[in-house]
């Protein structure tokens, strides 16, 4: 019993199973990236052993709830928190074993009540005069190992079996030579517009018009073409005029009439405008599969052995192909490896599928389905689009994709009976974690009390120095008419309606456009506002200016620019095709990339989409489409129009007034560029502002919001805070080290100065966050840039929170906040303020992102405190330094407190993400790489937090090492998934991206510090 308890019920075994579960989950994402999703599911996610680990963790949890007496009243918050995982586990089991997912494909003006399951099934079907016999088994097939199956089907008291034999990736149907086969002839027919393949077995015949084709059979018409076998060779005989062309040398000839001629394979035969050629000629063959050529797209295939009535035959099951008939033992069977058809108790009728594209482009912008639910006499109209899910009778429908001809929709469908147990578990989880932090008997409160009693000093925040270097196209000399700052200031406050509907000043739109296409807010000597205005007024001059940022070398090759060139011009995207006509160079690539599912897009696909978007934006600037400054009178949707849009949509006096107003302005600008006199242009722009105030008042932002947005653009709060955080954090860290090494030195003045610099920086950061929230009218953590800015704020907050107890914490978090802001302003992140796309317009998203990114701040502090603690251990001499020991105790306590807070936020944030996903597109967990690695992070930190219950690893040293390395799971979740794995959150989709050198350097430093500290572990005490 003791060994069983140790292996399955002890706290040590729980930690081990945490790590096994985490390693297995992380390995599955790598398997998915290296092979495919089916293999990941076959080997890990869908495997019985993976479910068994979760069951063992559940049983272990129940036992330890009893073992540690969590049912006592003072431990009630801990009990609630741990019980929540049992509900989540039960809900997950119900979802896995009783729920399902599928797809419904509906054409316009058609209806469907059939779903095709997302998972493929091995299926075997047979029938007689009275009964149909079926058996199926859901099966994920790996491209490596673990594919065994054995289906059993009883017919007439006899047993039919279907057993796995082999797997062939990327296969195509083919006739395979076999001594047990039969003669086979495949002919390919074609005319000017169509082609068709016809398969004939010995004795088959068919008619084309008044002519008979036969294979090994007598002709049935007076006009005939007879093909037959003789002595192992194929011959042809005809009474018609048939010409032929030899494919090898293009020579031509005619078949003699009523004469036996060998039927040659490499010939194209022609008769009466119809061509035919032999595609396959086999003396003895069976139907099977073969591996497709290198550039041929096939389907994965299973080779299985069908046994019945003392006879066996190998059959090929191609993925997603319809059931294949096969005769064995005198009985006909149909076998398949494909999704199951599920019939719904109601139908969905598709009235219209709508695909919106960007103006002047073929690039998709959004798509939606107008449907009617038909349930007997009941009918209900509904519109399905992203973030607008249809719920009906336990089924959820959400917009997934569309047919290539845009004439049909593809809806993803699921039914999840485990939803409510899971949601109840989420509720208990959040409640338990909240109460645990407030509970005076909790570990967190005990640590807080110990820290306060230690009476330690206070300190400040953040990391490393570095400035973002913005490159310019130095090889290109720009020569454009200059626009005075006085006029730029007037134009900057003109309100523009963005493509997403957000009302913003000209200044913001200009900065966003230049940052989007050029990745900077200046181009040589010109500012963003001047460039935006100049592009509209002098578009022809800008067509040849290299201003569109291009990073991918393959894309540069397509565009015809040197690899060393960082930017492409508008004209670089167009060139003559083989017929000498000018065409868009990326048209084929954009169509292909947009048709692919996001998880299957490679790095080149994503760069093509980005480049296409930049080109479209630049084109819309050139034609004035981005200059949407004219409010449309009495429009129910408060639409504002560009100059071109106004001329097309407006009529009567309104159209005349707008045309005159716009013409006055642009004429005045062109004249002013030559004369230098800008007074008329100033008057004309003021007239546009008055027109906006009169007819666009319903959506006009107030002047305070506009002025604050201009100030926000001008002062670049977050960018300028980077060096402040870094320098202050390093200064404080140096002060702390000096104080530790020389305790008698008085540094109170220096400490206070650095401390207040950090406090002021944090206040400025908070003001910047508040300004962005006020300007954007949504929480500022909705994209990559905003989330990093928010993480930096959380780091600064966590340092300030622990400042009274730990100067170390403030210094380290200040340094890390500076580094995070530095990363946020690198060129690959977009700082523009936007309206949210539909799927992001959710209060669940606001909560999910804010909570989970806040956890990164606290856990980042833990990593730095772990490193700091190890450095202090390494600095210990042969005789214990009491000051170093005191700081080790302080850092460890703060580390454990921060980890409890960080892990709590990480858990709640991760599961709230599931709620957001389920309410937005009907699926709260799909083992996508991002969510899987978030789970891995939770498991890693859960293991670290529970280390104190295991005597052998309950030490300050072990905790410091674990907390330092544990943050690598967060780094993998936030960055690694994006560039090295496949999935919805990924930028890589399997493409090789080199690991930056600094990662290996950082890893080496951590290992060296750990080894140096290991020698002094004798000074380490229990937690």
Image (cartoon, helix red, strand yellow):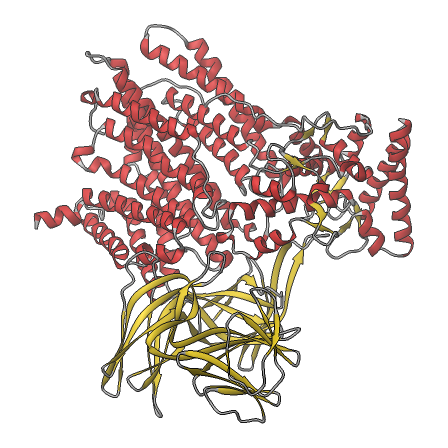
Q: Residue furthest top?
A: 745
* Left or right of 541 on screen, residue 740: left
Quarter of the image for residue 710 reads: top right
Q: Residue at x 34, y 44 (%)?
A: 936
Quarter of the image for residue 992 reads: top left
The relative height of residue 529 versus residue 10 in the rendered view (above or below) is: above
Q: Residue furthest left?
A: 1
Residue 143 visible, this orientation: yes
Residue 294 x %, y %: 46, 56
Residue 217 x %, y %: 47, 89
Front in this rendered view, residue 111 or 267:
267
Front in this rendered view, residue 964 or 229:
229
On-image quarter of the C terminus: top left
Front in this rendered view, residue 682 or 127:
127
Number of marks present in the image shown: 0
Residue 196 x %, y %: 56, 76
* Left or right of 476 on screen, residue 927: left
Front in this rendered view, residue 694 or 408:
408
Residue 700 visible, this orientation: no
Quarter of the image for residue 339 reads: bottom left
Q: Residue at x 40, y 12 (%)?
A: 735
Residue 284 x %, y %: 37, 77
């Amino acid at each position: 019993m003791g060994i069983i308890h140790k292996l399955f019920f002890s706290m040590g075994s729980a930690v081990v199973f945490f790590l096994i579960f985490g390693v297995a989950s992380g390995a599955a994402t790598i398997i998915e990236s290296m092979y495919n999703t089916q293999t990941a599911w076959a080997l890990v996610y869908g495997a019985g052993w993976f479910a068994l680990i979760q069951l063992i963790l559940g049983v272990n949890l129940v036992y330890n709830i009893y073992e540690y007496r969590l049912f006592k009243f003072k431990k009630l918050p801990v009990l609630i928190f741990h019980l929540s995982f049992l509900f989540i586990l039960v809900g997950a089991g119900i979802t896995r074993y009783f729920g399902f997912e599928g797809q419904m494909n509906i054409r316009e003006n058609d209806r469907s009540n059939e779903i095709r399951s997302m998972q493929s099934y091995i299926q075997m079907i047979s029938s007689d005069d009275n009964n149909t016999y079926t058996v199926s088994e859901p099966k994920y097939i790996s491209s490596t190992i673990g594919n065994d199956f054995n289906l059993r089907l009883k017919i007439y008291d006899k047993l039919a079996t279907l057993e796995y034999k082999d797997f062939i990736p990327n296969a195509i149907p083919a006739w395979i030579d076999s001594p047990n086969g039969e003669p086979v002839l495949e002919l390919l027919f074609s005319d000017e517009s169509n082609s068709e393949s016809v398969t004939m077995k010995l004795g088959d015949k068919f008619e084309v018009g008044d002519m008979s084709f036969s294979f090994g059979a007598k002709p049935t018409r007076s006009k005939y073409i007879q093909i037959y076998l003789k002595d192992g060779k194929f011959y042809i005989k005809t009474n018609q005029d048939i010409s032929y062309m030899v494919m090898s040398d293009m020579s031509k000839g005619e078949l003699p009439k009523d004469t036996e001629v060998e039927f040659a394979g490499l010939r194209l035969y022609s008769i009466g405008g119809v061509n035919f050629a032999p595609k396959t000629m086999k003396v003895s063959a069976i139907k099977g599969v073969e591996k497709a050529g290198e550039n041929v797209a096939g389907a994965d295939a299973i080779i299985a052995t069908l046994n019945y009535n003392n006879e066996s035959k190998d059959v090929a099951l191609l993925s997603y192909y319809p059931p294949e008939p096969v005769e064995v033992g005198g009985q006909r069977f149909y076998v398949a490896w494909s999704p199951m058809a599920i019939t719904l108790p109601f139908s969905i009728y598709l009235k219209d599928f709508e695909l919106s594209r960007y103006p002047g482009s073929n690039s998709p912008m959004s798509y939606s389905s107008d449907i009617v639910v038909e349930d007997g006499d009941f009918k209900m109209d509904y519109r399905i689009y992203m973030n607008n899910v249809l719920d009906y009778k336990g089924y959820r429908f959400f917009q997934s994709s569309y047919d290539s001809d845009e004439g049909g929709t593809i809806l993803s469908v699921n039914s999840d009976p485990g939803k409510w147990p899971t949601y109840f578990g989420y509720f208990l989880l959040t409640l338990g974690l909240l109460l645990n932090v407030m509970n005076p008997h909790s570990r967190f409160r005990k640590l807080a009390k110990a820290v306060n009693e230690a009476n330690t000093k206070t300190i400040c925040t953040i990391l490393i120095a570095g400035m973002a270097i913005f490159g310019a196209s130095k090889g290109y000399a720009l020569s454009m008419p200059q626009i005075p700052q006085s006029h730029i200031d007037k134009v900057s406050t003109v309100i523009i309606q963005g493509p997403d509907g957000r009302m913003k000043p000209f200044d913001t739109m200009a900065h966003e456009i230049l940052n989007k296409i050029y990745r900077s807010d200046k181009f040589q000597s010109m500012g963003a506002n001047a460039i935006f205005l100049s592009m509209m007024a002098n578009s022809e001059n800008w067509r040849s200016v290299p201003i569109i940022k291009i990073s991918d070398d393959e894309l540069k090759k397509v565009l015809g620019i040197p690899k060393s060139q960082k930017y492409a011009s508008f004209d670089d995207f167009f060139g003559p095709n083989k017929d000498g006509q000018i065409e868009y160079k990326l048209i084929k690539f954009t169509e292909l990339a947009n048709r692919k599912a996001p998880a299957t897009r490679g790095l080149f696909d994503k760069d093509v989409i980005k480049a296409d978007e930049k080109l479209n934006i630049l084109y819309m600037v050139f034609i004035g489409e981005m200059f949407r400054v004219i409010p449309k009178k009495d429009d129910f949707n408060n639409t504002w129009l560009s100059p071109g849009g106004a001329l097309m949509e407006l009529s009567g006096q309104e159209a005349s007034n707008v045309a005159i107003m716009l013409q006055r302005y642009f004429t005045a600008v062109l004249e002013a560029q030559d004369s230098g006199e800008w007074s008329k242009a100033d008057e004309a722009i003021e007239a546009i502002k008055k027109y906006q105030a009169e007819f666009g008042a319903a959506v006009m932002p107030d002047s305070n919001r506009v002025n604050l947005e201009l100030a926000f653009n001008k002062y670049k709060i977050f960018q300028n805070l980077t060096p402040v955080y870094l320098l202050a954090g390093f200064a404080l860290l140096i002060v702390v080290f000096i104080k530790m090494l020389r305790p008698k030195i008085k540094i109170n003045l220096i400490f206070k100065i650095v401390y207040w610099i950090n406090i002021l920086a944090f206040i400025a950061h908070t003001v910047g966050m508040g300004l962005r929230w006020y300007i954007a009218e949504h929480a500022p953590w909705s994209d990559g840039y905003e989330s990093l800015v928010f993480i930096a704020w959380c780091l600064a907050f966590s340092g300030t929170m622990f400042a009274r107890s730990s100067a170390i914490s403030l210094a380290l978090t200040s340094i890390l906040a500076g580094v995070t802001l530095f990363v946020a302003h690198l060129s690959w992140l977009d700082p523009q303020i936007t309206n949210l796309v539909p799927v992001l317009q959710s209060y669940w998203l606001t909560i999910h992102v804010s909570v989970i990114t806040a956890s990164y701040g606290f856990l980042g502090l833990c990593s730095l405190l772990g490193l700091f603690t190890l450095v202090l251990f390494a600095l210990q001499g042969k005789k214990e330094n009491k000051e170093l020991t005191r700081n080790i105790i302080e850092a460890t306590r703060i580390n454990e407190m921060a980890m409890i807070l960080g892990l709590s936020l990480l858990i709640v944030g991760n599961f709230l993400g599931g709620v957001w996903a389920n309410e937005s597109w009907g699926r709260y967990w799909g083992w996508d790489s991002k969510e899987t690695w978030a789970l891995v992070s939770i498991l890693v930190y859960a293991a670290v937090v529970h280390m104190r219950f295991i005597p052998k690893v309950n030490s300050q040293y072990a905790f410091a090492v674990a907390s330092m390395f544990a943050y690598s799971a967060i780094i993998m979740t936030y960055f690694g998934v994006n560039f090295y794995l496949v999935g919805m959150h990924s930028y890589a989709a399997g493409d090789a991206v080199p690991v930056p050198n600094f990662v290996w350097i950082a890893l080496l430093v951590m290992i060296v510090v750990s080894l140096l500290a290991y020698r002094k572990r004798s000074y380490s005490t229990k937690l």
